Image (tube, helix red, strand yellow):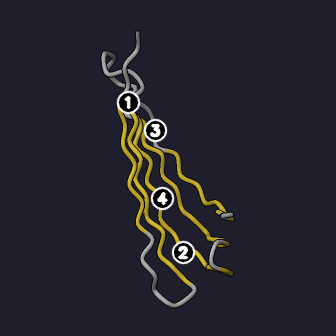
Amino acid sequence: ETKGVGYSATLMPKITENDSVYARIDNLDTDTETDGDSTMRLLAGLTHHFAKKISCGVIYQRVMPEEGDAVDGIMVKTQAGF
């Protein structure tokens, strides 16, 4: 039986009526009994809200495994609610 633990936190404060800063942190340890398997992920960027529930943003991501090299990337994030 494997037990893991993790957390995630997201902030999206508005900087204008239609634009927000996007900041998120994720941390996941898939097996609390095993060392070296946790990963932290940081995301930061800007989003534009086209409508109340539609947004698009450019996000920088850094994935940092407990063991191994960090990986960086840039992505386009789109979101639609209903």
- Discs 2, 1 touching: Cβ within 8 Å: no
Residue 43 circle label: 4
Distance, label 2 to label 1, CA atoms, is 28 Å
Q: Amino acid at mark 2?
A: Leu
Residue 69 circle label: 3
Distance, label 2 to label 3, CA atoms, is 26 Å
Q: Amino acid at mark 3?
A: Asp
Q: Amino acid at mark 4?
A: Leu
Give whichever of discs 4 and 1 has the lower sequence position.
Answer: 1
Return the residue at label 1: 29
> As drawn, is 33 to the left or to the right of 65?
left
Identify the residue at image location x=35%, y=25%.
36
Distance, label 3 to label 1, CA atoms, is 17 Å
Q: Secondary structure at mark 3?
A: loop
| Crowd class of label 4 (few under 14; some 14 to 19; many from 20; radius 10 Å) | some
Return the residue at label 2: 46
Location of residue 47 by image quarter: bottom right
Residue 23 drawn at (x, y percent): 43, 64
Give whichever of discs 3 and 1 has the lower sequence position.
Answer: 1
Task: Name the outermost residue toward the front.
Answer: 82
Distance, label 3 to label 4, CA atoms, is 17 Å
